[in-house]
Image (spheres, grey):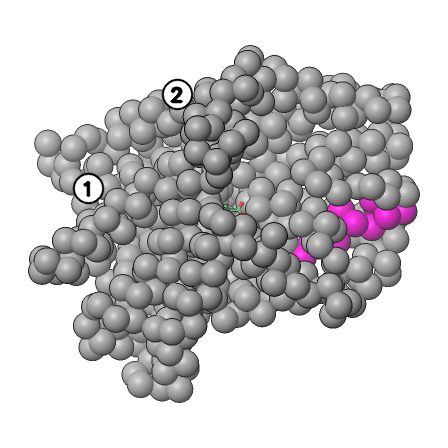
């Protein structure tokens, strides 16, 4: 079979749509607001912003650079840098970059399924006339139902496979050209609505008035982990999207663009959610249930208009999730088709099917298989179900490890002249700062996130 040709984005703008689509996801709209709420509002936001600048942007630049320089998907890209013994060891990093996104895909597609389920159920009025406690019950019924979760997970993976199978131009680009503008419009409409009907000033103070006494090592590590996940770092997506960039596009500019847009959406998600949550007095509205339990109550209180905004909100989440799942499937599909193993459509179908099977186990982790603890015999994993083990290894261990190693790879292993040329900034001050960060600060900082992810050092 002939290897598929390596393609390129139509323009830097389509790259931005796709890369922002990958970064903006459940992490921004579902997780960011509740983590902010649980961790002292403004203090968390402040630290988060600092971390995006000193860790996030340098790492985005690093991953984009590897992909763009090699013009190959992650594993081939890292392999292409050399054949010395040391480089053989680096291949492990390539494999990790190839496999981490698929691990994330297995649980991400289940939650993406919930958002589709909620969009449809809000639309048909399942959340109308909610009685006390009923919203939580509906959410728990979903978690308790393998069938319902598997059904919606199948839909989300099916959509993802269908898009990725069509390739870069008619699959990925076409879908982000529709979904991303729609996402921004819905988000702005929701923020406007929330600021007119809800307590906007209180939200503003909550998000931007830092209480410095709340800044602890734990908060810093949590913010770092969130930034990492939110920017899609360490998980193949940024690298493979970077490989579709042509040489005339500025990597630093693209990295800054992705970081700003991703952070902006996370903050806006806060402004879409907090004002209405505050003004409806649902005070204990934190934790993962913020979006799936609290918001349906609030929308229900607002009558038919709430129903419309509820559908919009869950569609927003679903769009954000789909533009992320396509970038989770893409690295492996690009790798298989460009190595000539399968045609792209088949590669998408087989990979999607394989991880759909794993997804079934994830969907059953909250019900039938909830007492199965795959690594329960090891103290650290005691009580973790299948989903938690997969999430732990992909998002806490290997994703973070990848980020650390890629910084070391660029800072210490590959030729400096190549890095200079690829960044296209000569030996300017910006280049020097970036290079220093990547050589020293980033690996050390990320090492702490990694150690905390495993040993929970911050307690
Ligand atoms: N950035 C995504 C979010 O915030 C999550 C994510 C992490 C991701 N790594 C990824 C998405 C790789 C796509 C590809 O929801």
- Under circle 1, the secondary element is helix
What residue do we see at 75% from left, 43% from top?
286
**Residue 338 numbered mark, or none:** 1
User: Residue 103: x percent and y percent?
Assistant: 40, 36
Magenta span of residues: 267-279
Q: Is residue 8 left or right of residue 219?
A: left
- Crowd around label 1: few <14 · some 14–19 · many ≥20 (10 Å): many
Number of numbered discs on residues:
2
Q: Position of residue 437 (x, y in %)?
A: 41, 74
Q: Which numbered disc, 2 or 1, marks the residue closer to the eye?
A: 2
Residue 71 found in image quarter: bottom left
Specify whether residue 152 is painted magenta.
no
Task: Give the side of residue 31 with respect to residue 234, left or right.
Answer: right
Q: Residue at x 42, y 47 (%)?
A: 397
Q: Is residue 99 placed above or below 230 in the rendered structure?
A: above
- Of 340 and 435, nearer the camera is 435
Q: Is residue 44 above or below residue 455?
A: below
Q: Secondary structure at mark 2?
A: helix
Closer to us: 272 or 174 = 272
Residue 372 seen by the camera: yes
Question: Label 2 vs label 1: CA separation?
Answer: 25 Å
156 to 216, vertically: above or below: above
Query: Which label was assigned to residue 157?
Result: none
Q: Nearer the viewer, residue 329 or 392?
A: 392
Q: Rate crowding at label 2 as few (under 14), some (14 to 19) or many (20 or more) other CA atoms within 10 Å.
A: few
Disc with the residue nearer the chain's start (2 vs 1): 1
Horizontal and vertical percent position of residue 9 = 34, 53
Residue beneath label 2, please?
Answer: 357
Name the residue located 15 percent from the left edge and 60 percent from the top edge: 86
């Amino acid at each position: 079979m002939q290897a598929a040709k390596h393609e390129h984005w139509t323009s830097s703008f389509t790259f931005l749509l796709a890369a922002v689509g990958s970064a903006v996801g459940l992490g921004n709209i579902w997780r960011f607001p509740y983590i902010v709420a649980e961790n002292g509002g403004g203090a968390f936001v402040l630290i988060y912003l600092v971390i995006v600048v000193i860790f996030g942007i340098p790492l985005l630049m690093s991953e984009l650079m590897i992909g763009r320089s090699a013009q190959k998907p992650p594993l081939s890209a890292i392999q292409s840098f050399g054949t010395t013994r040391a480089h053989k060891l680096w291949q492990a990093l390539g494999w990790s970059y190839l496999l981490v996104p698929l691990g994330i895909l297995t649980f991400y597609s289940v939650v993406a399924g919930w958002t589709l389920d909620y969009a449809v159920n809000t639309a048909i009025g399942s959340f109308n006339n909610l009685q006390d406690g009923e919203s939580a019950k509906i959410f728990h019924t979903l978690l308790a139902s393998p069938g319902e979760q598997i059904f919606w997970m199948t839909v989300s993976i099916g959509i993802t496979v269908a898009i990725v199978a069509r390739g870069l131009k008619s699959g990925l680009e076409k879908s982000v050209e529709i979904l991303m503008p729609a996402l921004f419009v819905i988000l702005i409409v929701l923020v406007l609505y929330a600021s007119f009907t809800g307590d906007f000033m209180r939200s503003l103070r909550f998000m931007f008035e830092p209480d410095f006494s709340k800044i602890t090592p734990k908060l810093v590590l949590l913010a770092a982990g969130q930034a990492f996940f939110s920017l899609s770092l360490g998980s193949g997506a940024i690298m493979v999207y970077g490989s579709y960039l042509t040489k005339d596009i500025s990597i630093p500019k693209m990295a800054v663009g992705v970081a700003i847009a991703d952070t902006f959406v996370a903050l806006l998600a806060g402004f879409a959610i907090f004002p209405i949550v505050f003004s409806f007095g649902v005070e204990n509205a934190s934790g993962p249930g913020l979006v799936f339990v609290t918001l349906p109550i609030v929308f229900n209180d607002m009558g038919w208009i709430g129903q419309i905004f509820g559908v919009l909100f869950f569609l927003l989440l679903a769009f954000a999730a789909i533009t992320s799942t396509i970038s989770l499937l893409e690295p492996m599909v690009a790798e298989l088709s460009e190595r000539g193993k399968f045609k792209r459509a088949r590669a998408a179908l087989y990979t999607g099917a394989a991880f759909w099977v794993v997804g079934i186990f994830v969907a059953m982790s909250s019900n039938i298989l909830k007492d199965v603890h795959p690594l329960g015999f090891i103290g650290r994993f005691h009580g973790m179900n299948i989903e938690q083990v997969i999430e732990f290894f992909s998002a806490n261990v290997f994703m973070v490890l990848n980020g650390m190693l890629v910084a070391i790879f660029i800072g210490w292993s590959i030729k400096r002249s190549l890095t200079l040329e690829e960044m296209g900034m000569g030996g300017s001050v910006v280049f020097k700062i970036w290079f220093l960060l990547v050589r020293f600060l980033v690996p050390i900082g990320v090492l702490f996130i990694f150690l905390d992810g495993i040993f929970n050092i911050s307690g």
